Image (tube, helix red, strand yellow):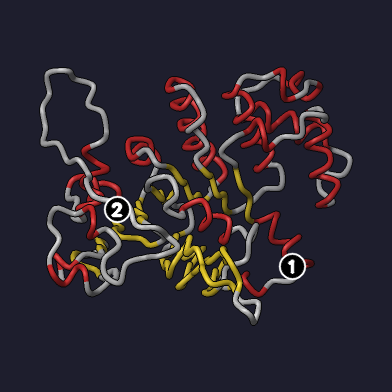
């Protein structure tokens, strides 16, 4: 039986903003992540997809404890890591690593790759006496020569930098990697190389990955299961084949319709989202997608739907399937 490595339970991340009242309390709150729950099995790639600003990257930062959730639990290996102190977090960093979206800004431009890697090994007290062997081995795994260690980040292309960022994350032998849009800043041909590399490393090293992206075609290539986020909440979740072949939520259908077809003669129904995108500071009472949904009903403007299992393993938050 597959082990559940990560559980996200009712996680919220709210950012106070705007003016304060006489008691010093903020009058407005931006609800970046608002009551999200899901689990990831050991060895699984879970894709998290949605428009820019939907809260998927913030959720990933809550899971890796780069930021602390406002409410909820993140349970990793049966431990609630939202309660972890600084000492425990240092140990946790070895098990949970992150690959950031922009490798240019996530690597120190003043340090060579060797210096960057050595700093990580020193902090975690790893590979004493065999540091060079470990660094060279990881560079070979991601397809780079060993002389890359003596170069600075500006001497590499974007794809090479992302390979280095992946190697840096693997340096401490983690169980779980949060990949935050790791290919969105790269050319299409380079994207395919990095995706294939992640798939290969996942199999070789038995990794579990949370893969965040806004491109559904990219997510389809790498994921086992997919969750679709909209304005801080998951609106649909299913196995990758089920989600792409039997899309249910109107928002997911619109995202699917936006995927380019590599055939100029192919035709399909256009799903153009109209209406205004609600503000995460002033969310509507009912369904958050109601103002843009062509299937909107009266109940949609009054009650926010909860995520329900409508088929085995297929969850959707929509009144059309109540």
Cα distance between the residues tagged 1 and 2: 33 Å
Compare residues 139 and 218 and report the one nearer the observer. Answer: 218
In the rendered image, residue 99, in percent from the top left (x then y), is placed at 60, 42
Quarter of the figure that contains the C terminus: bottom left
User: Reading the chain from its start, which is encountered first: label 1 or label 2?
Assistant: 1
Name the residue that disc number 1 marks. 88
Q: Identify the residue at horizontal 21%, vertical 56% (top origin).
A: 249
In the rendered image, residue 247, in percent from the top left (x then y), is placed at 19, 50
In the rendered image, residue 169, in percent from the top left (x then y), is placed at 66, 43
Q: Identify the residue at horizontal 35%, vertical 51% (top origin).
A: 226
Q: Is residue 290 left or right of residue 36?
A: left
How crowded is the residue under tag 1: few (<14 C-alpha within 10 Å), some, or many (20+)?
few
Q: Identify the residue at horizontal 37%, vertical 41% (top origin).
A: 219
Q: Secondary structure at mark 1?
A: helix
Name the residue that disc number 2 marks. 239
Quadrant location of residue 299?
Answer: bottom left
Farthest residue toward the bottom?
23
């Amino acid at each position: 039986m597959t082990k559940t490595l990560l559980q996200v339970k009712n996680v919220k991340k709210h950012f106070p903003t705007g003016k304060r009242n006489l008691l010093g309390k903020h009058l407005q709150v931006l609800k970046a992540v608002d009551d999200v729950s899901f689990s990831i099995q050991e060895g699984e790639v879970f894709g998290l997809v949605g428009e820019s600003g939907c809260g998927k990257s913030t959720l990933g930062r809550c899971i890796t404890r780069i930021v602390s959730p406002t409410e909820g639990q993140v349970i990793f290996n049966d431990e609630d890591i939202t309660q972890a102190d600084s000492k425990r977090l240092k140990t946790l960093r070895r098990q949970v690593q992150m690959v950031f979206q922009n490798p240019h800004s996530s690597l120190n431009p003043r340090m060579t790759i060797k210096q960057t890697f050595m700093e990580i090994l020193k902090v975690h007290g790893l590979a004493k006496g065999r540091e060079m062997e470990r660094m060279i081995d990881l560079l070979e795994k991601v397809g780079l020569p060993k002389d890359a260690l003596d170069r600075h980040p500006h001497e590499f292309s974007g794809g090479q930098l992302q390979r280095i960022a992946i190697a840096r994350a693997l340096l401490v032998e983690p169980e779980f990697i949060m990949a935050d849009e790791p290919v969105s800043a790269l050319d299409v041909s380079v994207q395919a190389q990095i995706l294939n590399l992640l798939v290969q490393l996942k199999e070789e090293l038995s990794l579990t990955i949370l893969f965040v992206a806004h491109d559904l075609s990219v997510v389809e290539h790498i994921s086992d299961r997919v969750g679709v986020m909209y304005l801080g909440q998951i609106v649909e979740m299913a196995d990758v084949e089920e989600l792409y072949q039997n899309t249910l939520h109107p928002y997911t259908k619109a995202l699917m319709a936006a995927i380019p077809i590599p055939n100029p003669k192919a035709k399909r129904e256009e799903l153009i989202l109209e209406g205004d995108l609600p503000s995460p500071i002033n969310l509507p009472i009912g369904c958050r997608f109601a103002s843009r949904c062509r299937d909107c009903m009266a109940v949609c403007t009054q009650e926010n739907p909860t995520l329900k299992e409508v088929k085995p393993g297929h969850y959707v938050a929509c009144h059309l399937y109540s």
